[in-house]
Image (spheres, coloured by chain):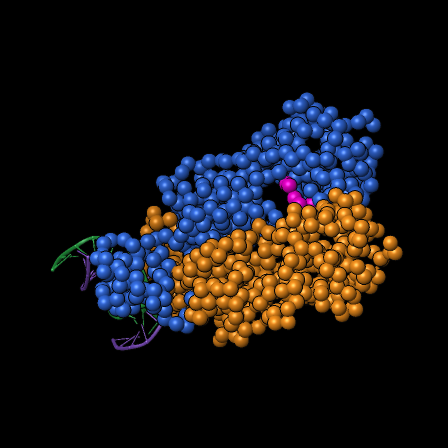
Chain colours: A blue, B orange, C green, D purple
Amino acid sequence: MAKTERGVNVFDVARAAGVSKSTAARVLAGAGSASPRAVERVRAAAASLGYTPNGLAKAMVSGETNTIGVIVPDISSAFFAAVVRGITDVARTEGFEVLLSNTDGHAEAEDRTLEVFAQKRVDGIVIAPLNRERSAALAQLEALGMPLVLLDRSSPAASGSTLVSLDHAAASGLAVEHLVKLGHERIAVLSEAGGRLDELLAPDVDRSQLPPSSLRLLGFVDAMAEHGLPLDRSAVIAAGYDREAGRAAVRERFARDDRPTALYCTSELLSSGAYEALLDLGLRYPEDVSFIGFDDQEWCTLVRPAITVVAQPHYDLGSATAHRLVAAIRGPRPDPARIALPPTLVVRHSTGPARAR
Amino acid sequence: MAKTERGVNVFDVARAAGVSKSTAARVLAGAGSASPRAVERVRAAAASLGYTPNGLAKAMVSGETNTIGVIVPDISSAFFAAVVRGITDVARTEGFEVLLSNTDGHAEAEDRTLEVFAQKRVDGIVIAPLNRERSAALAQLEALGMPLVLLDRSSPAASGSTLVSLDHAAASGLAVEHLVKLGHERIAVLSEAGGRLDELLAPDVDRSQLPPSSLRLLGFVDAMAEHGLPLDRSAVIAAGYDREAGRAAVRERFARDDRPTALYCTSELLSSGAYEALLDLGLRYPEDVSFIGFDDQEWCTLVRPAITVVAQPHYDLGSATAHRLVAAIRGPRPDPARIALPPTLVVRHSTGPARAR
DNA sequence: TTGAAAGCGCTAACAG
DNA sequence: CTGTTAGCGCTTTCAA
């Protein structure tokens, strides 16, 4: 409220009702006992005075703000917008409000937000953390006992907290399986992590600390192996993290003569870029190339033929995250867990049988 | 913070630094004077103890929470996701955090949120209000002096607050002008308000209280008149508020023989539905019908031919709203204003010259 | 420059 | 059942 007016408080209500402050407080809080008459008078006084309890004062004594903080890279991305919706919905039914913050991938913004949330005494935090080695702010918060749930990606700084994410590897498994069943053997992957394939394949990598893009790529590699298919390095296409980069990379690769018969894209942005490349090249799908996009975006249902995609359970990701956080806030500190939600394959018309070239 | 640990407070810091509570408070707040030596000791103590100021206590005495509340129908819609991004960005640079809430069109949820935000003592509220006659909660908040800014649509309950919205009428003007220049005369509109055209055309309607859908439709009607074109009632297509409704309505209308040569859609959802209808009907665009979508969505750039659209300045809508709110919070109560941001016409390839039939 | 003390609005004992 | 009394952690006079 603006600091203009003083606002009416319990004492004002008590006076108007002709009872003591504590009696008024008791009926207002609905706790403790009070005579029917007192209850009625206090209620009436509160109503006529337009009393609005001061949550700050309440929070100060109870130690609970009934607020959770949510930190994402960018709420305007379709993915996070949907996930946050899931979070806010369960937060509401569980009695929490949500404080939202975007980091845009800036460590500084993430740290600052963590600090502000701590000062605001949120009851818990959901964070889609930046991918970095050290995050003192995050580690400290966890050490202090702040309930935390990691969203979509892990963080070495919060290894004691639960991670809720998509089963990234399974997503790639679904795509590969589908293509293999259609008879494809020369399958290309478009991945942001494409350029780091060798590092990722090193024997000592700890997969639990890898970002989504890497996990999806490794999932692809594993799936190919499971199906007994050779990994053609020229079929793993590396691209930066945006639509234009995906477009350029695919255009370059698919313009060559030894073009693969199928393409699987490992992220939403890369999918649309790759699709544009197909258009640029005048390649027909599924005839010339079978195409699998990542994430069921609106455009996938509007282009013709419609696009086959690996869909993520956005909303569920959010609700599972929030449920987990609420449990952590209410109960004793839970053991860290890794909850990986299953992706779904939505078969439409951009994938078809492999044909002899 | 979890109510587990007591947390260190100013007093703890003061003791560790060997000064009084008020001296410590002064240096921590950076206000008032203190000897260099005291400053140093307090700072050191705070750092080593891991002191995190309690924002609740601070807010209680200052009366400012540095938090604003944002209430939208659905954060997972591309429109609001982008607008909220704009809001959070300026909120951050101005030193505010944002509390987010979805109403899903439920009055009950809106009222409840307003109440909770008031209890949490947010400094101001941005609300995309529900379209209803009375909203006691909103009216009361405004009367109490809560800084308020209406987003995208007006509310009779908050007539004293500023409204920041798209210039809905101008959006339709842009579309009509473009089509007229291409020689179209038989232009169809797809509108959620289509069924209420007569009411809207009544002489006594107060346009300032109309929802976006109605304003866009009236903007279309006015623009047609300005260009001296007759309003063909069979060319105003009414549809419910979702993609499927738009699809069905357009399919029905464009299957008839007297089909218009152009179609202008007045909302994002209706646009994709209408587009599907064109596909269903096997109509080619722009040859068979020129098509203008509302809101520059991703699919509009991925289908071929790409879609000409009336684009809304999502982000700017958000940032303008937030700036306005911050001004209202900081300064004296500003006069209510109506800020209508201009739409833009993005010409692509779904519109072409009208041809004789 | 520094300390003591009085609240901000509410909850939670603890006596009557 | 009801009133009195302490705080929660911080800012802010007001003296010293």
Q: Position of residue B185 (x, y in %)?
A: 81, 61
Q: Position of residue B133 (x, y in %)?
A: 51, 64
* Residue at horizontal 45 percent and vertical 59 percent from the top: B111
Give the extent of the magenta segment. Answer: A295-299
* Residue at horizontal 68 percent and vertical 22 percent from the top: A228
Residue B131 appears in the figure: yes
Q: Nearer the viewer, residue A170 or B291?
A: B291
Position of A335 compared to A318: left or right? left
Q: Does the magenta segment cover residue B120? A: no
Q: Position of residue B353 (x, y in %)?
A: 85, 57
Q: Quadrant of the N terminus of chain A?
A: bottom left
Q: Position of residue A191 (x, y in %)?
A: 68, 39
Image mark count: 0
* Residue at horizontal 60 percent and vertical 32 percent from the top: A170
Q: Nearer the viewer, residue B315 or A147?
A: B315
Q: Nearer the viewer, residue A33 or B236?
A: B236
Q: Is residue A66 above or below residue A7?
A: above
Position of B172 compared to D10: left or right? right
Q: Nearer the viewer, residue B313 or A124?
A: B313
Q: Is residue B73 above or below residue A240?
A: below
Magenta segment main secondary structure:
loop
Position of A14 compared to A261: left or right? left
